Amino acid sequence: MTTVALLEARIEAFSYHGDDADVLHDVDVAAAPGTLTAVLGGSGSGKSTLGRLLAGWLSGGNSGQFRGTLHLRPSALRRDSDRRAAPGDSGPLVFHGTPDDPRINPALWSEHVGFVPQDAAALLSTVGSTVAEELAFGLENRGMDRTLMHAEVLRAADSAGLTALLERDPATLSGGELRRLAVACSAITRPGVLVLDEPLGSLDAAGAASVQAMVRRLLDSGTAVVVLGQAVDELALSATRWLVLDGGTVTAHGTPGELAGSPALLHSGVVLPALADDSPGPRRRTADRHPAPTGPGTENSAPAVLELDRVSFGYPAGKHQTGPGVLGDLSLAVRAGQIVAVTGPNGAGKSTLLRHVNGLLRPLRGAVRIEGKDIAGIPTGRVADRVGLLFQHPRDQLFERTVLREVLFGLDRKSGAAAEAAARAALTAVGLGDQLKAHPHELPASRQRLLALATVLAREPILIALDEPTVGLDRHGLVRLDEALGAAAERGAAVVMVTHEVAYARATAHRVLELRDATLHEV
Amino acid sequence: MPAPLNTPAALNPLTTLAAAVAGAAITTAVSSWAVSLAVALACAALAVRSGVAGRLAPAAAVILAPFWLSLLVMHGLFFPEGRTVLADWGAARVTAEGLRFALDMGARTAAYVMVFLLFSFTVRVPDLVAVMSARRVPPQFGYVLASTLTLAPAISGKLARIRRAQESRGLVLGGGPLRRLAAVRLQMVPLVLSLIEDAGERAQALDARGFNGSRARTSYRDVPDTAAQRAFRAVALLLAAAAVALRLSGQWPQLQGPQLQGFAMLWPLGVPA
Amino acid sequence: MSQPSRTLPAPGQAAVRNRRLLEILGAVSIAATFIFLVLTQPADITNGLAGGSTLVALGGFLLGAILLIVGVLPTLPTSTLVLIPVALVLNIALGQIMGSTGLPFYFDAIGTVLIAVLAGPAAGAATGALSSVVWSFINPTVLPFAAGAALIGFLAGLAARYGLFRRFYLAPVAGFVTGILAGVVSAPIAAFVFGGTSGVGTGAIVSAFRAMGDTLLAAITKQALISDPMDKAIVFAVVAMLAYALPRRTTLQFAFVRRFNVLAGKKQDAPDA
């Protein structure tokens, strides 16, 4: 690297209030103009904390204790655009973890280092009634003249590909559009450095491509971009430099070519592209004890665990613009021990389909049968005794004070005295056996998903239904999920999952179907 | 509830606010059930004209119907100060004074409710926030107002999601009141937790985007104003001030009515009647 | 500090003093209005509620609430400010639900008390007052009660400051006392502005006291002394339960919680965490 880094961070140690252990220690990051740095790490590696620290969100002693230095140099990008004199290089800010540490002014810091958190919606002010006003929010706060502001908003919208959406309500944007809006909101003050936390997380292919194109444009304009991620995706592969973060510290750094296949990367929880390989790899399940039936009408003596019989469903007109029928005359049978994956683009109705299996949604026509019995009229809470449904947002399902109590909840009603043993076994199965006393909401996102999985597994349901199980899971988590599903199928449970990741579906399921035009097609 | 964004708002929000405040103040100062009812009806007519009657009517009914019922029972049947007894069933006594009191109060509150609902159902909150920030009202106030209205549907969506997730975990909703209460507790915990966590994240995002109120804000949104509206606001507020001053100074022509005695009796420092 | 341009200076003293002055003026306005209402000739509310007392009650309490809001809001850190809209949605949603059940409780202060426990008395008072102001966009009748709501937030913050939330059983006691004070302050509003209470349940209780010959203010005050302390005791207990369900990392983000050790009992609750 020939250019001088705009931001150099040296983190000796950082810990949150109330935690004894350091979340980060001995991490060095440098961001040079026009370069893309990918910080790769599994769940709980401390990468989100690192992003916040670089963004100046955690200094000042309100969140935790920080020892180290942050060194910001003026960017050529800003000297051109900013009419006020840019502050010269006045040396690094030094933090000792004491109350009289310098307190970063986040408003001024963000003019140099922009940050987009993992949950892009968190960046939105909630007071902008249109996309244009949301973009203008940061400029309004800086007292910019209205004429100039209009011009800046148009420029930012153009570079984010949001020009056609300027008058839309931000609450109605799709995932990819929302992510681009959040990046544009951070980039509107033309910071020299942009830090993006999981910019492609939970986006489908089209959404991911649009965000990637935007990052490319920012790099071309000379912005230094730091991407935090837990998967080696296309964006990471195009990076100038990788840092592998594991257990709160950097275990390897270098170019993507140097690090691909390195032990440090393998040891970290980073999801590797091999998993996303399109060809059916060795992970493909072969031990299907029940030969996959060729169609829903196949004759078989034992009743299917789950049977959707010519199910039709449509949301009330006016609430959704997706057309009158989301599901039309859809049939599906899943047998004991079988794993079925349903794929399809966002908005095809995958989640709608999944919500029928435990009665959260009821079909307009047709029937849903569990072990041959129609569930019409049975409340979801009762169907849940036999059907475990896992949602995309694990936080919604967790409400207890400790991990163990979470799994125990409602279990004694079902399992009686054996409840505690069943709960511990389920937690061990997902790799949380050593965190029984942790607060569920303080776990990293990946482990929250596994905990939610454990609450389902402990009840030994006859059918396990999963909504986008791969989202937010790191490689260790994916392995645990895979093992757990394999064990459940082994014990005779049926598994049905919906996912937008076709490669994962092929690698994991016995049978892959695509939801298209309101009905299922064999893939 | 904010008006839909696409309806053209001809009036500056300050004008409708001034009209609402003046209307409520003058109605209270005049204190006559006929005037109150006239104001309430005028508001209803304006609501029909501006196309918000469909949303305003149920909102007003939900507030006023139980209130009127409560007043009718309270004062219609139990009005110990009443002299003109129309019917007597022991403890309960229908008096002309009680009915008159209920009518006065019911009409005045109806006018007050209609005036302010008409304002809030026709105002465009982003416009209101923009004019307030131009008038040096602390930007935090506009933030709280606009953000609450944005968050309300988002939070009810979140609650629905939590309910679905918990039902899928085997929570049977419904049953007796105690079971319902327990279910509410289980829903409150993840709801409040995630709301507070989201809010913490948003706070840092707002700080980074320069929202700390230390610098004078400008506004992206341009809210038109006219000289005529400015004049109207001045006149309306002056009239309201005059009416209030007249009432407080005791110069208002008194209407004859029964006197309620002994309100100060509860208070040790009460002034003798 | 080597880089004054990117780091924050210590907060200015003069600005803080000005804000404090507004807060004190707001509190004085509320207290003076209350004392005035109790001491002045309340007999004039009879004939058509001829508005002297009504206007004083409305004007004085609202002025006090607005001064409090303007004084406190700009001093709040953003992390507290973003919680206020969340608290308001909780207040309004629960308040609307409770109002529709007909039970003589309100439950419309859970958000306010939660903010007070996490961020202190000033934030609690501002939240309470703002809650009434924003809620009045869908139910204007709550606007006059802004001062009472501010008092609840303030007292809840004081209770947290002096450690009453460190023991689970002390929280409802603090709520009970808060309810007594808040009820007494709000009763004149119900009596002088509305001539009764808006709920059917509360109305029935007032009617019962009226049937025994109480004056209107006395009956409403007694009703408030029945409903409010119970209601606030429940609300404080619910908030204590929520505060202890929050992860430590979340609660410790708040300087008020750290400085006054508001939730010290938590350590004994989860020693392994």
Image (cartoon, coloured by chain):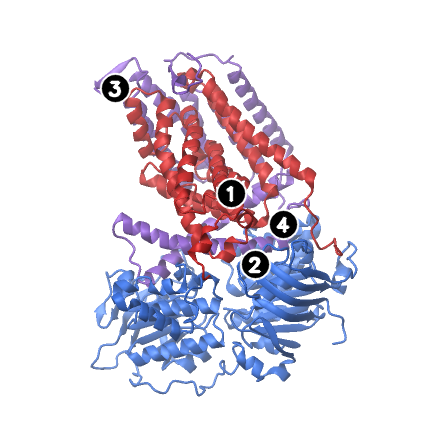
Q: Residue at x 28, y 21 (%)?
A: C212
Residue hosting label 4: B211
Q: Residues within 10 Å of mark 2 (few under 14, many from 20)?
A: some
Dot 1 amino acid type: Arg
Q: Amino acid at mark 2?
A: Leu
Q: Residue at x 41, y 32 (%)?
A: C180
In the visual, does A371 lie left or right of C102? Answer: left
Mark 4 vs mark 3, CA separation in Å: 60 Å
- Amino acid on which the number 4 mark rests in the picture: Phe
Q: Which residue is mark 3?
A: B93
Q: Which chain is purple in the rendering? A: B
Which amino acid is tagged 3? Arg
Question: CB under 8 Å between callouts 4 and 3?
Answer: no
Q: Are marks 1 and 2 in contact (CB under 8 Å)?
A: no
Residue B184 in sight from this viewpoint: yes
Measured in 3D between alpha carbons, the distance from the residue under mark 2 to the one under mark 3, in whole angstroms, is 65 Å
